[in-house]
Image: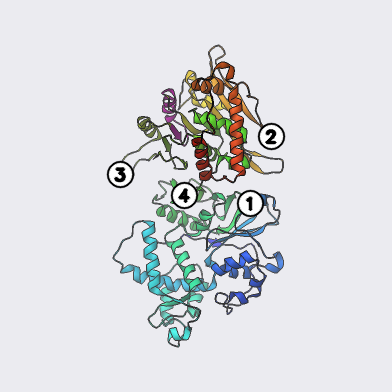
Amino acid sequence: MGSLSANINLPFKPEEVDEDDDIYSDYESSALYRMLPANAKEYVAQSPHLLEYLQIFPVNLFGIPLFFSELKRELKGMDNPNIIYPVDEFTFIHIFADQDDVRNFYIPIEPSFMHSVAEAMPLIEKKLVDIVDVLEEDPVTEEERIEVLKRVLKEVIYIKSPEENIAALTGGTHGESESLKDKIIGFLNKDFSSKDDLDAIVKSKIPVTSDGKIILSLAEYRSIEYLMIRDKIQMGILKPFLSDPYIEDITCDGVGPIFIEHKIFKGIKSAVEFKYSDDIDDFVIKMAERIKRPITYRNPIVDATLPDGSRINIVYGTEVSKHGSNFTIRKFSEEPASIVQLVEWKTTDYMVAGYLWICIEFGMSLFMSGETASGKTTSLNALTTFIAPESKIVTIEDTPELTVPHKNWTREVSKGKGKGEGESGEVTMFDLLRAALRQRPNYILVGEIRGSEGAVAFGAMQTGHPVMSTFHAASVEKLIQRLCSDPINIPMTHVDNLNLVIIQSAVRRPNGDMVRRMLSVNELVGYDPESGGFSFVSMFIWNPITDEFDFPGKGSSYLLENKIATLLGIPDNKKSDMYFEVEKRARILQRLHKAGYTRFWDLYHMMTKVKKQGLIKIEV
């Protein structure tokens, strides 16, 4: 039950605040509140701790931050950001410029900034321990533990309405009745970070009712509830990062700040930091326990999935990591990016999407290939909307990342060897792929092919089961080399069972931005026994000068003319009409995009309606 915490190192000198000011019951009288824009006032009404944070922020020096309900990609170009946006009803993020570094600051604003809440927390924890000790129930799931904690909190806290008088509730006394000795004993039994915590307990005048309940306002109570659930059940100080939909990666390299890859502001550093190696060690041990993957010196590396689906890698101790324990979290997005969002971001364009739509709908096998963090899984997921809606799909992954919009979807995840007594053995990607072939899927999606499962995947392609997967290779030539050597060992003559290879990469533009682009879309044609090489045709190529996609393969597509047109019974003299079909589908996607069907699920449902109405039927 120990909390997962670190230090907050604010990148500015906090302004002094009069602690006697009751901003929670009368925040509207605050001069700073009156200066806020309308949307910020709404946030303060819901979460008064936001105003307390703004009071310690040097507004006279840096100005009142801009408030955004959501972030647009146009904000990327902001030179000196000073903006605040909400993550949930309690948590806000302050992006603040660092004049001395290319990385700006990321400051989570949580109820922990609320002075009265921080003051009451030790006493509430002390009372909670007494109640929890006598509880007979043993909650198992996270939801059950949250419900128990909420119920127990209501046993020790009295929520005061604005009209109620403190003196009447406390019987004329204002403060906790326990002796100084009791307070010191309570302090010694806790793990507080400094003498300041002892002073807070000794000096505090926390109001309690005659029957010993701690008196809090509704705002204070909701803040306490948030912090208790965050620290006792959830991921502690990491919660704002995990809740932020604009974060892609969270990294702690050792002592120092937590670093973030942000979708809008790119590489930034957090105000949350670790000051000592021991603190990081304790943190990763507790975090590993919380996700039920204990870490030790004998087993110092953990790869796991967090409850929200994010992937985490933990390395423990200085023996294997010279800068001390570290961890990296790759955030899971609840709603995948859609293909038109990829067009919006210039990862691809409408013509490429129209071409891939036809190929995938008619069962072509495809590998999305590129380096680490090139956006392969994101792009592969976006392409799943092109699979015919009536299809049965099986996904096979090490870590569940793919989200398929189809109703008939079987999701398989590999399993490592059980370490405990009675636990079942290992279930590999290879095992799952073999099992999938017996499930009669229309499409098999493999999270990543990197070993013996590759041979089974090619066997599936040979028997008419289309396969889509990601693959680590920076070019078609490198991909073929890896397929034909250990540990995959596909015979060169079998490689053309794979129809399409998309090469994707993270590339740097002239303005310094790092962006993701589909560098090429390639059709694999076949093995040439005379030259001993493998021939492929690049249908689309990204032009780095114009940042657009050229279509050099127009008029020479083996898949469109010889595979799909033949499958449809289109005569030779009309096979060139397939290129008009690509343009037609590109226009359909463009119209859906302009009509506002941008998000993954919305786009899929509209594409299903378009198909049902016969608008994408290829005329023979």
Q: Which residue position is annotated with label 3?
A: 423
Q: Is residue 250 above or below residue 385?
A: below
Inspect this view and state whether residue 195 appears. no
The label nearer to you, 2 versus 3, is 2
Residue 181 occupies quadrant: bottom left
Q: Which residue position is annotated with label 1?
A: 72
Q: Earlier in the sequence, mark 1 or mark 3?
A: 1
- What residue lies at 34% left-to-right and 71% top-to-bottom? 131
Identify the amino acid type marked 3: Glu
Q: Is residue 207 above or below residue 555?
A: below
Q: Which mark is residue 316?
A: 4
Circles 1 and 2: CB atoms closer than 8 Å: no
**In what element is the residue under mark 4?**
loop
Q: Position of residue 97 (x, y in %)?
A: 67, 57
Start-end of magenta stretch:
443-463
- On screen, residue 305 versus residue 583, left or right, reads left
Q: Residues within 10 Å of mark 3 (few under 14, many from 20)?
A: few
Identify the amino acid type marked 2: Pro
Q: Residues within 10 Å of mark 4 (few under 14, many from 20)?
A: many
Q: Residues within 10 Å of mark 1 (few under 14, many from 20)?
A: few
Q: Which mark is residue 544?
A: 2
- What residue lies at 59% left-to-right and 16% top-to-bottom? 573
Q: Earlier in the sequence, mark 1 or mark 2?
A: 1
Inspect this view and state whether residue 370 appears. yes
Q: Earlier in the sequence, mark 4 or mark 3?
A: 4
